[in-house]
Image (cartoon, helix red, strand yellow):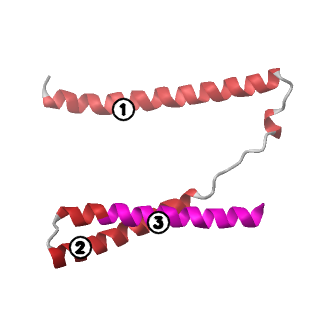
Amino acid sequence: MDVAMVGVFIPIVGIIAISVLVIYLRKFENEERMSMIDKGMNPADMKIIRNTSWPLRFALLLIGGGTGLVVGYMLDINTRMDDVAYFSMIFVFGGIGLGLSYLIEEKKNKGEG
């Protein structure tokens, strides 16, 4: 198969896959509501629990990744570790950022409940 032909098919397949995904998600959401109505429940009465902690997680992950890049750069200059320093420090400091977000969320949840 020609490379240009594959390049044309990738966006087409991607758009079709996203469309099918959206259609199935809406279908299952509708089936869930219908089963709630069949059981005598009101779907509007269901309290939707929203997870508001994802921005904190994402922000601390990016801060950790940026710090890991800086520390990796310093290690690369001082010890000539090449690419190993960058990847390892990004993962280490990104993990520290996610751990810190977990601790902050746990502290917040203890205060609420």
**Is residue 70 found left or right of 109 in the rendered image?**
left
Evaluate if marks 1 and 3 touch, with contact meaning CB atoms under 8 Å apart: no
Q: Residues within 10 Å of mark 2 (few under 14, many from 20)?
A: some
* Element type at mark 1: helix
Name the residue beneath numbered marker 1: 14
Name the residue beneath numbered marker 2: 73
How far apart in space, not on screen, are marks 2 and 3 (Cα)?
A: 19 Å
Residue 19, relative to residue 59: is it above or below? above
Task: Point out the image quarter for the N terminus.
Answer: top left
Residue at 26 percent of width and 70 percent of height: 72
Residue at 79 percent of width and 39 percent of height: 46
Residue 9, relative to residue 54: is it above or below? above
How far apart in space, not on screen, are marks 2 and 1 (Cα)?
A: 37 Å
Amino acid identity at mark 1: Gly
Residue at 30 percent of width and 69 percent of height: 69
List x then y, in percent, for residue 56: 55, 63
Near-viewer residue (70 or 32) = 70
Name of the residue lying farthest toward the top: 38
List x then y, in percent, for residue 95: 43, 61
Near-viewer residue (5 or 68) = 68
**Is residue 109 found left or right of 62 in the rendered image?**
right
| Badge count | 3
Whether residue 92 is in magenta: the answer is yes
List x then y, in percent, for residue 99: 50, 63
Q: Nearer the viewer, mark 1 or mark 3?
A: 3
Whether residue 77 is in magenta: the answer is no
* Element type at mark 2: helix
Amino acid identity at mark 3: Gly
Name the residue beneath numbered marker 3: 97
The segment highlighted magenta reads 89-113
Near-viewer residue (92 or 68) = 92
Residue at 62 percent of width and 26 percent of height: 28
